[in-house]
Image (cartoon, rainbow, N blue to C red):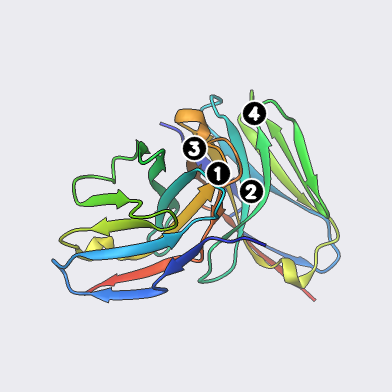
Amino acid sequence: KQEVTQIPAALSVPEGENLVLNCSFTDSAIYNLQWFRQDPGKGLTSLLLIQSSQREQTSGRLNASLDKSSGRSTLYIAASQPGDSATYLCAVGVGNAGNMLTFGGGTRLMVKP
Amino acid sequence: EPEVTQTPSHQVTQMGQEVILRCVPISNHLYFYWYRQILGQKVEFLVSFYNNEISEKSEIFDDQFSVERPDGSNFTLKIRSTKLEDSAMYFCASSEQGFNTQYFGPGTRLTVL
């Protein structure tokens, strides 16, 4: 059974710092990996999707990498801002064509001004 | 920008009652999903739906649950005979294809008393 783990569970950094969030998964047979942002009491906002054949994706200050063979992904956030404070979730796509997402527990990020 | 919408935002029901949660997926999307998040726990996959039938379902999605696309725009989750442990945030999502980015709605918070 696929298990997704995110370390650390919580992270507090000063504004402007570059940071890396980690995601690991136990079964490398995935179709894709998706990173989300979740604000308290709110829905999930998709940040980046990496297909299994890709190594990385970039969107603005965000860069996500995928190493399928080792079962790892990282989300790099450059020049963090207080508005980046949220919980970041990674999810791997499994099942029929990857349409079943298995989520990690998230990393709760606080960026202090 | 198109978005997934869900109604109601909060539903309170008595144990044993039936509830219907409603979602309007993004209009050109073909795949629809339901996930749930019990407070403090991971987001869990319930079911995916494509071409008017269930594509995949998890162990959680037993006979108590059913999904339907009653018309060209709505996608519903019915929970029969609700239990206390059904209390959770229920998220609807949609994607163009099964392996594409899944876009989530804001969620319906279900409270079973």
Q: In the image, which disc is placed on residue A52?
A: 4
For the residues labelled 2 and 3, the Cα–Cα distance comes to 15 Å
Question: Closest to the observer: B59 or B40?
Answer: B59
Which amino acid, by three-letter code, is at mark 4? Ser
Q: Residue at x 68, y 37 (%)?
A: A50
Q: Earlier in the sequence, mark 1 or mark 2?
A: 2
Q: In the image, which disc is placed on residue B71?
A: none
Is disc 1 placed on a helix, strand or loop?
A: strand
Residue labelled with disc 2: A35
Residue B67, placed above or below residue A42: above
Which amino acid, by three-letter code, is at mark 1? Ala
For the residues labelled 3 and 1, the Cα–Cα distance comes to 11 Å
Q: Earlier in the sequence, mark 3 or mark 1?
A: 1
Q: Are marks 2 and 3 in contact (CB under 8 Å)?
A: no
Q: Chain of mark 3?
A: A
For the residues labelled 2 and 4, the Cα–Cα distance comes to 14 Å
Q: Are marks 2 and 4 in contact (CB under 8 Å)?
A: no
Classify residue A109 by image quadrant.
bottom right
For the residues labelled 1 and 4, the Cα–Cα distance comes to 13 Å
Disc 4 crowd rating (10 Å Cα; few below 14, some 14-19, many 20+) is some
Q: Quadrant of the C terminus of chain B?
A: bottom left
Residue A1, placed above or below residue B74: above
Numbered disc in front, either 3 or 1: 3
Residue labelled with disc 1: A91
Is disc 4 placed on a helix, strand or loop?
A: loop
Classify residue A64 by image quadrant.
top right
Which amino acid, by three-letter code, is at mark 2? Trp
Numbered disc in front, either 4 or 3: 3
Q: Chain of mark 1?
A: A
